[in-house]
Image (cartoon, rainbow, N blue to C red):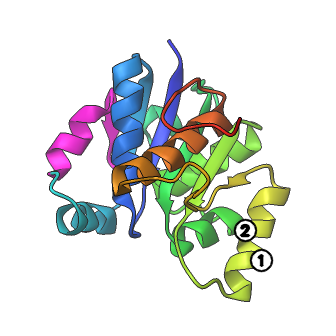
C-alpha cells in the first residue's frame, strides 16, 4: 500500500490539508498525519470541522511530540510528505534542519532520504527571509507549492479553487486525480 505523510502546520488554509486527507482516504492510500498545536486551533477557527474528524481521516495519527514515531525514521518507507499549509515558522525549521518536533523531523527525513517533500507555503507578502528559506529547501530537494489559484478554468466557487490546489499537490506527488480542469 502506498504511504503519504501529511503535516498540517499553524497557518491559514488548513482546509487544503483536510481535503487532501479526504482524497487519500477515498482512494485507499495509507496516510500518516501530524497536526501542530496551532493548526488544531486554526481548524476549529477557520472550518466547521472538528480536530477529531481530521485525525480520523488519516490511517494513522501521530502526536507532534512523538519523536519515536515510525515516520521519524528513514527506514519507514513512504512515497513522500506534504505540509499543507506550511507556516513560515515550519518552513524556517525545515530550511535550517531544526528537527525539534515530529513534523520537522519527518520533513528532514524526506530530504535526507531524497523522497518528495512538498511545502504548501502560506504567507503573503513574502520577506527576503521567507524567500531565502524557500530557496534553501528547494536546493535541498524540496518542492515549494504556494496555494495560488488559477483563473483559466473560470472557477465558480471557493471549493473549485481549493480542489485545484489539492489537485496540483497530488500532481506533484505523481498521484492521478481529476480534481481540476486541466489546460487543453
x, y percentage for residue 62?
Answer: 34, 41
Q: Residues within 10 Å of mark 1 (few under 14, many from 20)?
A: few
Depth check: give the residue in front, 46 or 100. 46
Depth check: give the residue in front, 6 or 183. 183
Task: Return the residue at label 1.
Answer: 132
Query: Would you say residue 14 is visible in this rendering?
Result: yes
User: Taking 77 as reference, is 53 above or below it?
Assistant: below
x, y percentage for residue 180?
Answer: 52, 38
Task: Return the residue at label 2.
Answer: 134
Q: Quadrant of residue 78?
A: top right
x, y percentage for residue 47?
Answer: 21, 60
Count how many numbered circles sit on residues in the image: 2
x, y percentage for residue 45?
Answer: 19, 69
The magenta segment = 50-65
Query: Which residue: 39% across, 30% down?
Result: 23
Secondary structure beneath disc 2? helix
Query: Which residue: 72% across, 73% down?
Result: 133
**Whether label 2 touches label 1, CB < 8 Å:** yes
User: Taking 69 as reference, is 177 above or below it?
Assistant: above
- With 101 as the anchor, is 73 left or right in this view? right
| Image quadrant where one finds the C terminus | top right
Secondary structure beneath disc 1? helix
Depth check: give the residue in front, 159 or 36. 159
Query: Which residue: 65% across, 45% down?
Result: 117
Amino acid at each position: 500500500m502506498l504511504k503519504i505523510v501529511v503535516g498540517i502546520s499553524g497557518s491559514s488554509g488548513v482546509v487544503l490539508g483536510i481535503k487532501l486527507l479526504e482524497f487519500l482516504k477515498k482512494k485507499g492510500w495509507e496516510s500518516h498525519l501530524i497536526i501542530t498545536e496551532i493548526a488544531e486551533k486554526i481548524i476549529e477557527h477557520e472550518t466547521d470541522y472538528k480536530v477529531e474528524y481530521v485525525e480520523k481521516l488519516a490511517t494513522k495519527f501521530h502526536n507532534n511530540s512523538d519523536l519515536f514515531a515510525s515516520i521519524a525514521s528513514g527506514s519507514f518507507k513512504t512515497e513522500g510528505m506534504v505540509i499543507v499549509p506550511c507556516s513560515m515558522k515550519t518552513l524556517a525549521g525545515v530550511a535550517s534542519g531544526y528537527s525539534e518536533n515530529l513534523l520537522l523531523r519527518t520533513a528532514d527525513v524526506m530530504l535526507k532520504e531524497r523522497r518528495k517533500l512538498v511545502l504548501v507555503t502560506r504567507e503573503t507578502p513574502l520577506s527576503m527571509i521567507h524567500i531565502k528559506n524557500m530557496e534553501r529547501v528547494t536546493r535541498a530537494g524540496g518542492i515549494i507549492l504556494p496555494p495560488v489559484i488559477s483563473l483559466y478554468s473560470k472557477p465558480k466557487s471557493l471549493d473549485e479553487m481549493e480542489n485545484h490546489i489539492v489537485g496540483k499537490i497530488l500532481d506533484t506527488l505523481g498521484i492521478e486525480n481529476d480534481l481540476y480542469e486541466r489546460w487543453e
